[in-house]
């Protein structure tokens, strides 16, 4: 059995210090409950404070340093999306820190959400990522990526047993979130851990509803619309058993 958890944050727009404190508090509490893999939401340090992204991105290395210490202290995998400054460009990057405190992988969001102009402030990634971790292969996705089934299928075919979805998904389309999480888990026969935010920023109300979904599309744990911690034990053997019973991924590889 594996204890999986997430922190659903009410992100305070542009307030990095407060957001980091809230996230670290959540990590500490979930560590005390035995969580082994933990997910934080999309751009959890600052939200989509697009006008000040460079300033926020310059704080990311120090934030990652804190998370590395937490991961090593608690023997825990920690992941979440943060703004990354590289080569004069800003990326929406989902970092995964392994239990030993090393960065096992980083994934730059491929599908930028053009309706809100995300593409005007961020550069798109161009590489799918399956991280090699101490619990097995873990695929990485960020928010809008959820609407593109080919990405999750590719992660599954590359061996992902768990896919993490770090998000800022709006309340207005929260029913889509619920449907798509189940679909991605079921069609790829893997676990989905999805961390959303709640509350609102200057323009958008967010839906919460963070959840952990089984390979059979069953919602094992689900948050409501307020800041909270979520954790549950998952049985990784369920993946192998279900894939043997209904071997659809075998056909997908041919």
Image (cartoon, grey):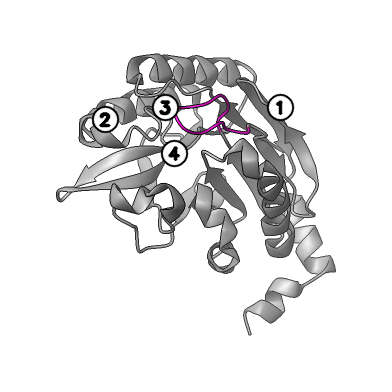
Q: Position of residue 182 (x, y in %)?
A: 73, 52
The foreground one among 198 and 57 is 198
Which is more foreground, mark 1 or mark 3? 1
Whether residue 48 is situated above or below residue 117 in the rendered picture: above
Whether pointer 1 and pointer 3 mark residues with C-beta atoms closer than 8 Å, the reply is no
What is the quadrant of residue 97 in the picture? Answer: top left
Q: Which is more N-terminal, label 4 or label 3?
A: 3
Crowding around mark 1 (Cα neighbors within 10 Å: few <14, some 14 to 19, many 20+) is: few
User: Relative to 65, is 214 above or below?
Assistant: below
Location of residue 55 in the rendering, given as x and y in whole percent from the top left corner: 21, 30
Element at label 4? loop
Between the C-alphas of marks 1 and 4, the distance is: 28 Å
Does residue 85 appear left or right of residue 145 in this picture?
A: left
Pointer 1 or 2: first along the chain = 2
Q: Is residue 252 left or right of residue 197?
A: right
According to the image, label 3 marks what residue? 72
Q: Quadrant of residue 173?
A: top right
Q: Which residue is mark 2?
A: 56
Question: Is disc 2 placed on a helix, strand or loop?
Answer: helix
Q: In front: 122, or 105?
A: 122
Q: Position of residue 27 (x, y in %)?
A: 51, 21
Sequence-wise first label, 2 or 3: 2
> Mark 1 = which residue?
224
Question: Looking at this rendering, what residue extends furthest in the bottom direction?
Answer: 254
The residue at 58%/69% (across/down) is: 157
How far across and how far down the image is residue 118, in percent? 37, 48
4 or 2: tag closer to the N-terminus: 2
Residue extent of the magenta highlight: 197-207
**Location of the C terminus (image quadrant):** bottom right
Measured Cα–Cα span from mark 2 to mark 3? 25 Å
């Amino acid at each position: 059995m594996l204890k999986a958890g997430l922190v659903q944050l009410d992100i305070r727009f542009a307030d990095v210090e407060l957001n980091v404190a809230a996230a670290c508090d959540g990590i500490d509490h979930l560590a005390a409950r035995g969580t082994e893999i933990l997910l934080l939401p999309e751009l959890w340090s600052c939200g989509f404070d697009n006008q000040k992204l460079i300033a926020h991105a310059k704080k990311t290395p120090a934030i990652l340093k804190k998370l590395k210490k937490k991961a090593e202290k608690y023997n825990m995998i920690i992941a979440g999306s943060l703004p990354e400054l590289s080569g004069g460009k800003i990326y929406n990057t989902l970092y995964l820190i392994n239990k030993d405190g090393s960065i096992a992988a980083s994934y730059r969001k491929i599908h930028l959400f053009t309706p809100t102009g995300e593409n005007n402030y961020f550069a798109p990634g161009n590489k799918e990522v399956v991280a090699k971790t101490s619990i097995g292969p873990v695929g990485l996705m960020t928010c809008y990526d959820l609407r593109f089934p080919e990405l999750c299928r590719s992660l599954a075919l590359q061996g992902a047993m768990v896919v993490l979805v770090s998000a800022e998904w709006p309340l207005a389309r929260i029913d889509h979130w619920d449907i798509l999480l189940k679909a991605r888990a079921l069609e790829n026969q893997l676990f989905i851990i999805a961390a959303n935010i709640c509350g609102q920023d200057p323009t958008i109300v967010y839906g919460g509803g963070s959840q952990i979904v089984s390979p059979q599309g069953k919602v094992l744990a689900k948050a409501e619309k307020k800041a909270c911690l979520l954790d549950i034990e998952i049985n990784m053997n369920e993946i192998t058993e279900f894939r043997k019973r209904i071997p659809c991924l075998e056909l997908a590889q041919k």
